[in-house]
Amino acid sequence: MLFYNGIAFCDGTFQQIDVRTGGDRIAETGPSLKRADGEEAVDLQGMWLLPGFFDVHTHGRDGADFSDAPAEELVRIRDSYARCGVTSLLATTMTMEENYSRAMLKRIRTAIEEKSDGARIWGINLEGPFLGPDKKGCHDPQYLRKPDIAWFEELDGCAGGHIRLVDLDPTLDGAMDFIRAFAGKKKLSIAHTGADYETACLAVDAGADHVTHLYNAMNGLNHRKPGVVGMVQDREVWAELICDGVHVHPAVVRMTFAADAGKLCIVSDSLSAAGLGDGIYSLGGLEVHVTGRRAALADGTLACSVSDVFEECRNVISFGVAPEAAISAASRNPAKAMGLEGEIGDIRPGLLADLLVVTPDFALKRVYVGGKEIR
């Protein structure tokens, strides 16, 4: 297939080039590529061609949650993700009871390994149980626990080794030993913590290189106590940012992109209500009330979002951030953060042909996964 006569987003910039796919990969890019006999061609006049978006922190959407839905439902929503421009994701868990956690990870493993034309699940984001009770958010406190190497290895066994990202509070007993044990083997994220700047830096020195939903479930930035937020400015780490306009104010989104655009990964942190409407939903066994754009526990605690990464990327641009920075934070940056830049996240020969056709005002027109059109 040949995509021609449009603008492609390659290597972080918009370029007037054509793109050819072969099988499920990008085969060639360049100006004015010649159409081969019998080759399908897509005229991109007035359109942008973008790499598919990657959500590294999503609990579910379209009525299904990775923590409690049957495996067949988790396979079904892979198509739902792709249809909204998210062609890659990490299935993100909640803090659950031990036996339930084992079963949950086995179900997610099935969803990962099942053949599907929908979004690719590149692994699991284990959010919990190694989180701080003081910054638990909507995680059930009765199941939180200190980082435990043996328990994690059992969970990863249930997941078929698919756990890619582990969230943990570095202030908990055993956290630094856990980080050192899995550094270079798993991606490790500072999460749900009251850690100060110094402790956050020690966690990075030990091997953590990721921060879960920056600003949320952590101490705020203070001019004398910079905390995790200040550490992100100083150290080589990746930082997730929920850009639904509810979890982080647009002014703070602009400020954060101005300071750290190259480190940011736009994430949805979505729950099963994403793509649906107002109502009462379940998240990790807890009741969540959705009204408009806000999802909260019964006590008012802000929960996950009802958004998706494509919508959030459009939000970021509308907030005043350059499209190049916003698109990179939805594609190139998360691919690099998860060590997948050799497979996805850009438009260049050899990468998977996961592609989005959008208008310059960010209306999604077509989605391709592995060179196959699904929308």
Image: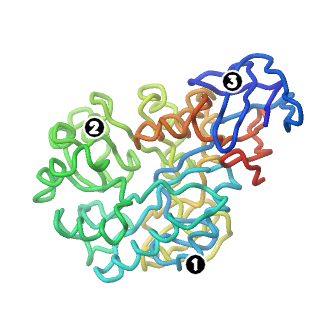
Q: Is residue 285 above or below residue 8?
A: below
Q: Nearer the viewer, residue 352 or 85?
A: 352
Q: Residue furthest top?
A: 31
- Left or right relative to 87: residue 220: left
Q: Residue at x 20, y 70 (%)?
A: 151
Earlier in the chain: of badge 1 and badge 2, it is: 2
Q: Which mark is residue 222?
A: 2
Residue 45: horizontal and vertical position, in percent? 87, 28
Q: Residue at x 67, y 62 (%)?
A: 80
Label 2 and label 3: CA atoms lie apart by 47 Å
Residue identified by numbered label 1 = 280
Q: Residue at x 75, y 24 (%)?
A: 18
Residue identified by numbered label 3 = 29
Q: Nearer the viewer, residue 251 or 162?
A: 162
- Left or right relative to 188: residue 363: right
Residue type at mark 3? Answer: Thr
Residue 210: horizontal and vertical position, in percent? 33, 43
Earlier in the chain: of badge 2 and badge 3, it is: 3
Residue type at mark 1? Answer: Ile
Label 1 and label 3: CA atoms lie apart by 47 Å
